[in-house]
Amino acid sequence: MENFVVSARKYRPGTFSTVVGQEHVTDTLRNALLTHQLAHAFLFCGPRGVGKTTCARILAKAINCFHLTPEGDPCNECDSCKAFNENRSLNIFELDAASNNSVEDIRSLIDSVRVAPQMGTKSVYIIDEVHMLSTAAFNAFLKTLEEPPPHALFILATTEKHKILPTILSRCQKFDFKRIKVDYITNHLKSIAEKENVQYELDALQLIAIKADGGLRDALSIFDQVVNFSKKNVTLKIVHENLSILDEDIYFEVFLYVHQRNYKNAILLFNQILEKGFDSVTFVSGLLEHVRNLIVSKNPETMKLMEVTDLHKKNYIQQSQTFSESYLINAFQLVTEVEQKIRSSQSPNLLVELLLIKLSNLWNAIELIMDNDELQLKKKVV
């Protein structure tokens, strides 16, 4: 059987120019390489799967590259680059701080730092999940991190910067990696799908990008899973089925019944969702997101805050016009209260049914308040 390589590894960037959505980091690192103004210690912070370790490896490769490109990328052709790409470079050391977090591990690292590189000019030490080091290990590392040998350079990566000692932070150049935008992830998935001869619907790739929550690695893992399930034909329906995601159209239908004050059909629709295997918590979480999107879609300036497919964006704009802002704000508060209670409730389904009844009758409550306000205003005028 042929060895399968997951997309996250197969299409891992090998140059700064191929890193997705982190230009503020890659441009700075390339400029530092070209001007020979590299710091001796870097700290890469940010959510999971956004390119911290990838950028650390590219930087380590570029530092020892014999023929750096004019753009500041490694050439991938010299002996040093080839050794790195083939995992036989003796200049680059990776340490997983999650499993090597003791003082003894750091002392062993410090001993190896004294040895000069056999090829190239720098020995690069990449310490992943550095926040997992013990306090004693951090303290043992301080002096070496502040004044390493001229040939040593450290790249620390973490998802939890707040757990790192201030004394460590002050000795590093800090780079904050951002969640990758949905459009960037979608375009990247599109390019991979075309290379792998995978048929796709653009809305399906957008939904995968949305569910990845800003992490490209998560998006690629989901993509591989859906491709295997769909036999290289990725459709929106298949993504919903494979990831057990409630179709957004369900919530549009719920709020259509709510607008018609038809809580009976809304409850029947909720029961159909339960019969398909979804639970109340999932339904209410999606309902809260739906109300939030209806609120932000009422204003052109806040519409950019929605992370939905292009098709659903139009539907949100259309449906939001049928609800007043006052109604949506009150509905948002109602759904939020139920979401907070439902996880500890012994009768979660009853809570949701009551919520749908309240949402359907919320119109009457708001109209009554408005009528009373108008009456009070008329009294004052008289």
Image (tube, rainbow, N blue to C red):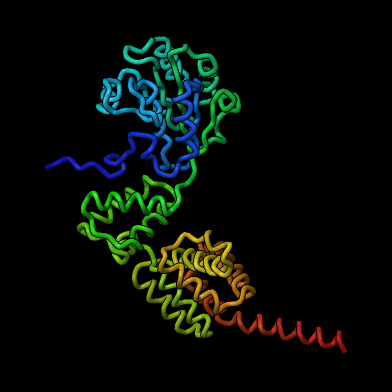
Residue 280 image-quadrant placement: bottom left
Q: Among all residues in the image, which is located at the extreme left?
A: 1
Vertical comparison of 4 with 302: above or below: above
Residue at (55, 81) in percent of width and height:
360
Q: Is residue 335 visible?
A: yes
Q: Among all residues in the image, which is located at the extreme front?
A: 70
Q: Among all residues in the image, which is located at the extreme bottom?
A: 382
Residue at (45, 74) in percent of width and height:
252
Residue at (41, 63) in percent of width and height:
309
Residue at (47, 29) in percent of width and height:
31
Q: Is residue 338 left or right of 187 when viewed as pictured?
A: right
| Foreground pick, 204 / 2 | 204
Q: Is residue 99 visible?
A: no
Q: What x and y, as percent, mark residue 122?
A: 40, 17
Residue 14 image-quadrant placement: top left
Q: Is residue 7 left or right of 335 when viewed as pictured?
A: left
